[in-house]
Amino acid sequence: MPHDDLRSFLDVLDAAGQLLRISDEVAPEPDLGAAANAVARLGENAPALYFDNVTGFTDARIALNVHGSWANHALALDLPADTAVKEQVAEFIRRWETFPVPPERRADPGWARNTRTGGEVDVFEVLPLFRLNDGDGGFYIDKAVVVSRDPDEPDNFDKQNVGVYRIEVKGRAKLGLQPVPMHDIALHLRKAEENGADLPVAIAVGNDPIISIVGGTPLAYDQSEYEMAGALRGAPAPIATAPLTGFDVPWGAEVVLEGVIEGRRREIEGPFGEFTGHYSGGRNMTVVRVDRISFRDRPVFESLYLGMPWTEIDYLIGPATCVPIYQQLKADFPEVRAVNAMYTHGLLAVIATGKRYGGFAKAVGMRALTIPHGLGYCKVIIVVDEDVDPFNLPQVMWALSTKVNPAGDVLNLPNLSVLELDPGSQPPGISNKLIIDATTPVEPDARGHYSQPVTDLPEAAAWIDRLRRLLAARAG
């Protein structure tokens, strides 16, 4: 059954043994960030964390690491907790094919029960804010979805963007927001500023698990995140109308902030410990004025720890990065078999493909650099043969070590776009990109000596099953 809000999903995690409730009193800093950092080191079945006894807050409820394991990610997709990662990606692809599934508009959202407007707006009153890493420049809201609309087509539902962007809290009604230039909200903001206007936004905090996944998925500009959420849920995504902006926001959100990104205004934002495992420095970023805040009774604040991978964000956006790249590449090259772009949000991607002729694998790699996500993220592309599993790193390492001749299989492409958060870019936002062709040469490319590959014996598959049964019987 799909999860309509964060609270119902926390109950599912609890029932599955994937939620750890910590009732002892803890300090907001450093305990909350340190606990979220630590739980990420417990392995692929780490639980979510729930705190309700935090020093200095009279009535705080804080959820961390909600998506922070393959078990939790599987439960978010309503799959068994022990579903293997490769099977989760395959199911993600299967559900993607059912897009679009129109959303369901519902009345009486829980977040509409309490409201503050104008001078009464105080983010600190509603959210128990804390720093995640000790070098952060302030408090951050980093797992909310931000809703914006194309100013030139405000009634175009498909061009309404729902994305996850980091948000620094700078005052009771003032936020700093980072719109990465390759993301849809940056396109919306540019259009608004060209028209001399502010850009209205609605920010939903504490959402159902699928909305959080979709908010970090690089969809096409005119693909609706809510319609994709319906496809991934297997049921229409519940939405409601935000009262000030009129935008469509998640029905099950804990808190909804409404206001505007103030046109042509920038202030220093940061630093922040990012998904790259490095701090981003202070940079001029947009300013959000919050004009209305709506919230549920006793709201739950959900936060996302980022730091040296792997952390929750890597589980959250791993499959959500692989699948769009796979779908967009396969539309042009049906030979593409699989894509593993789980490493640092796809800064590195491994693509398995068949080949039509010599040089074909390099063409697939170059196309990956020009899809929407590739423009800002894909920096290193490794292309392997179709019989190499890109999720099996020993196989990928074998392909790299035996199939690559640096004299012709490595393409170093200078001065291409990358997101500014990439610590290796110089200047920020510009980087060389690398394509490594780790495939077997085919005609007319006749390099190397690959005519006698060793393959599995025909009986090996049956023996795998037999040995597994024997091991299971011994364990039982």
Image: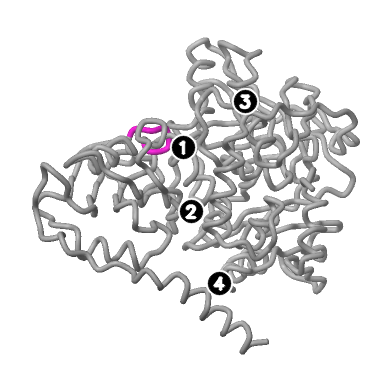
List the single residue furthest toward the front: 459
Assess whether residue 188 is covered by the magenta stretch: no
The reply to whether dot 4 and dot 3 touch (C-beta < 8 Å) is no
What element does badge 4 sit on?
helix
**Residue 236 spot, x, y in % from top left:** 75, 33
Question: Which-is-in-front pick, marks 1 and 4?
Answer: 1
Q: CA distance from mark 1 to mark 4?
A: 32 Å
Q: Between residue 370 and residue 100, name the one nearer to us.
A: 100
Q: What number is the disc on residue 275?
A: 2
What element does badge 3 sit on?
strand
Question: Which stretch appears magenta?
Answer: 370-374
Going from N to C along the chain, the mark reached first, 4 or 3, is 4
Assess whether residue 371 is covered by the magenta stretch: yes
Q: Which residue is mark 4?
A: 41
In this rendering, position of residue 31 left or right of residue 419: right
Q: Which residue is mark 1?
A: 327
Going from N to C along the chain, the mark reached first, 4 or 2, is 4
Going from N to C along the chain, the mark reached first, 2 or 1, is 2
Q: Which residue is mark 3?
A: 148
**Residue 108 spot, x, y in % from top left:** 90, 31
What element does badge 2 sit on?
loop
Q: Between residue 71 and residue 48, name the one nearer to us.
A: 71
Q: CA distance from mark 4 to mark 2?
A: 15 Å
Question: Which-is-in-front pick, marks 2 and 1?
Answer: 1
The reply to whether dot 4 and dot 2 touch (C-beta < 8 Å) is no
Q: CA distance from mark 2 to mark 1?
A: 24 Å
Point out the image quarter for the C terminus: bottom right
Q: CA distance from mark 1 to mark 3?
A: 25 Å
